[in-house]
Image (cartoon, rainbow, N blue to C red):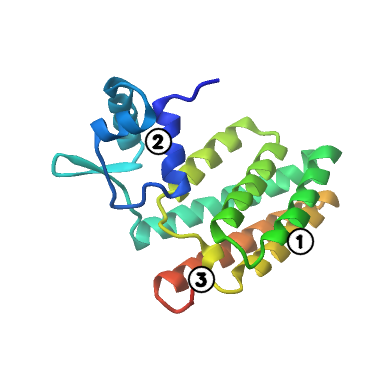
């Protein structure tokens, strides 16, 4: 199925092709995407309404998150992700658990490599936990949260040592889900997000080296 202009632009922001502060020009984007200007204009308006883009004079630029917005986002994300893990421990199928276990094993091969590749793998991991909760309304809310995560210019996986520690945390989360221990899964995932937030704050403050 051919993707629409909105999906293509959103994916480009999530990949980091367009970073916070980058100006999006309707004509240039239409040419790049190989579509007419009308669907691009509509997509940009939709992304502006969702807070993904903001105005700088007459131009639209990719939005950025200030310190308070970042804290608010992580507060919501921590609770929703924890709930997803708790529900996944209750409702995940054996197949979903095995796939999660396989993801952790495969993602370890990315340690010390490309942080962006590990970031993409991380999104797939969390997305499967969301789906394994088998709660469509929770999945919808987490989709909104993760869309806003794309407004961060860097990934915490670029921080030295974070990749291996994060995958250890992933393993602990999956172990709790496989054991159908909702409380353990909830607390393991909340702790994981909290540590990611702490890493991001330290990176933004210049206390941690990135590669």
Q: Quadrant of residue 166?
A: bottom right
Residue name at image x 30 percent, y 36 percent: 48
Report the disc number at residue 75.
Answer: none
Q: Position of residue 92 (x, y in %)?
A: 78, 40
Viewer-closest of 140 and 56: 56
What residue is disc 3 on? 211
Q: Position of residue 121 (x, y in %)?
A: 63, 50
Q: Earlier in the sequence, mark 3 or mark 2?
A: 2
Q: Is residue 54 left or right of residue 154?
A: left
Q: Earlier in the sequence, mark 1 or mark 3?
A: 1
Q: Is residue 78 left or right of residue 168?
A: left
Label 1: state its secondary structure. Answer: helix
Label 3: state its secondary structure. Answer: loop
- Tag 1 near tag 3, CB within 8 Å: no
Residue name at image x 81 percent, y 56 percent: 175
Viewer-closest of 159 and 179: 159
Residue name at image x 55 percent, y 20 percent: 1
What residue is disc 2 on? 9
- Tag 1 near tag 2, CB within 8 Å: no
Bin the neighbour count of mark 3 within 10 Å (Cα to Cα): few under 14, some 14-19, many 20 and up. few
What residue is disc 1 on? 172
Closer to viewer: mark 1 or mark 2: 2
């Amino acid at each position: 199925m051919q993707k629409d202009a909105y999906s293509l632009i959103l994916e480009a922001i999530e990949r980091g092709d367009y970073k916070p502060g980058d100006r999006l020009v309707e004509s240039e984007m239409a040419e790049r995407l190989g579509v007419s200007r009308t669907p691009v204009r509509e997509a940009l308006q939709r992304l502006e309404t969702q807070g993904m883009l903001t105005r700088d004079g007459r131009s639209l630029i990719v939005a950025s998150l200030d310190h308070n917005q970042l804290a608010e986002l992580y507060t919501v994300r921590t609770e929703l992700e924890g709930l997803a893990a708790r529900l996944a421990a209750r409702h995940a199928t054996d197949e979903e658990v095995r796939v999660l276990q396989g993801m952790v094993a495969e993602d370890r091969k990315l340690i010390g490599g490309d942080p962006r590749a590990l970031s993409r793998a991380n999104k797939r991991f969390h997305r499967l936990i969301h789906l394994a909760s088998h709660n469509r309304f929770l999945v919808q809310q987490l989709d909104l949260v993760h869309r806003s995560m794309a407004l961060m210019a860097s990934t915490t996986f670029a921080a030295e040592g974070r990749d291996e520690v994060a995958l250890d945390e992933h393993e602990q989360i999956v172990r709790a889900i496989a054991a159908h221990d909702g409380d353990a899964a909830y607390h393991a995932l909340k702790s994981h997000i909290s540590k990611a937030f702490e890493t991001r704050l330290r990176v933004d403050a210049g206390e941690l080296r990135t590669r």
